[in-house]
Image (cartoon, rainbow, N blue to C red):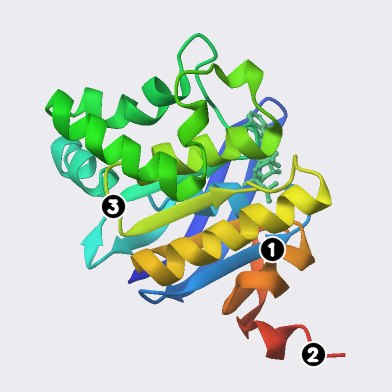
Amino acid sequence: MIEFQNISKVYQGKNGEVQALEHVNLKIMDGEIYGIIGLSGAGKSTLLSMINGLEYPSEGAVLVNGNNICGMSFSGLQKIRRTIGMIFQEFNLLNSRTVRHNISLPLIIAGEDKAVIRERVDKLLQFVGLTDKAEQFPDQLSGGQKQRVGIARALVTNPSILLSDEATSALDPDTMESILDLLKRINKEMGITIVMVTHQIRAVQKICNKVAVMQSGKVIEEGEVFQVFSNP
Ligand code: ADP
Ligand code: ADP
């Protein structure tokens, strides 16, 4: 379970303070696909980044499976981060490295055995449908294929949580549908909890169970997707 307890966040911007989040309370249960939706600047990315300690709240606590991310030692945070994968709008791949190397990176950093890495990466290449692209470079791939590489890299450490920051926002509509189908499979077949930040209602309606609607740093609605979007 992921729990945001009374989270506020103030950034020190160039033109003074920016209140990015204000008293946010949310609970995300294991096995859910949870959408966080809202306009640009609503605070979605800031909130998501607190789950793996890329950002810290100014006030409040973030609990991941009962562990408070905020007061944690660096080694404790490293341990938690290995259980959390993340994917991005711009994919964040290394263009000078092959698809296989990109996917392998988290395991190379973790000092994993070469043969173990090869086997794990082969499995994931097959899962995301890129077996024939293993030795190619990101520049040779379409946007959808690049995102599949990003997804495989996020899954390579066997995480229990996948964070998605606008992962379908740079894709054309058909490609977006196929990436959403893949995320749904990851949730169903691997039992991975997915937290998905997006401004696309379509993405939430297609795969999310629950949704929080954010506006100006606050959660203005929260609940089952069919209930939240059936309100007049
Ligand atoms: P998105 O809206 O897609 O989440 P942003 O453009 O808001 O992306 O943010 C992109 C990056 O720039 C993030 O790492 C964020 O922390 C940083 N950022 C956003 N707004 C500011 C700002 N006013 N000053 C400094 N950094 C910012
Ligand atoms: P969203 O993901 O919904 O677009 P963000 O979480 O990126 O929203 O940003 C929320 C607010 O915080 C925005 O006003 C943004 O400009 C500001 N912000 C984000 N990151 C930073 C930062 N590193 N420094 C200053 N302001 C930031």
Left or right of 17 in this view: 158: left
Q: Which quarter of the figure is the N terminus placed in?
A: bottom left
Whole-percent x, y for residue 72 in the image: 20, 46
Instruction: Give the quadrant of residue 74.
Output: top left
Whole-percent x, y for residue 138 in the image: 58, 21
In this orientation, which residue lies closer to the viewer: 7 or 88? 88
Q: Quadrant of ligand 1?
A: top right
Helix, strand or loop at mark 3: loop
Q: Amino acid at mark 3?
A: Ile
The answer to which of marks 1 and 2 sits earlier in the sequence is 1
**CB contact under 8 Å: marks 2 and 3:** no
| Dot 1 crowding, Cα within 10 Å, few <14, some 14–19, many 20+ | many
Specify the label residue 138 is tagged with: none
Q: Circle 3 is placed at which residue position? A: 69
Q: Circle 1 is placed at which residue position? A: 37
Whole-percent x, y for residue 123 in the image: 33, 44
Instruction: Give the quadrant of residue 202.
Output: bottom right
Helix, strand or loop at mark 1: strand
Q: Which quarter of the figure is the C terminus placed in?
A: bottom right
In this orientation, which residue lies closer to the viewer: 11 or 51? 51
Q: CA distance from mark 1 to mark 2?
A: 15 Å
The residue lying at 60 percent from left, 73 percent from top is 208
Q: Circle 2 is placed at which residue position? A: 230
Is any atom of residue 53 visible in this view?
no
Q: Amino acid at mark 1?
A: Ile
Judged by depth in the image, the label closer to the viewer, 2 or 3, is 2
Q: Amino acid at mark 2?
A: Ser
Judged by depth in the image, the label closer to the viewer, 1 or 3, is 1
Whole-percent x, y for residue 22 in the image: 58, 61
Is any atom of residue 75 visible in this view?
yes
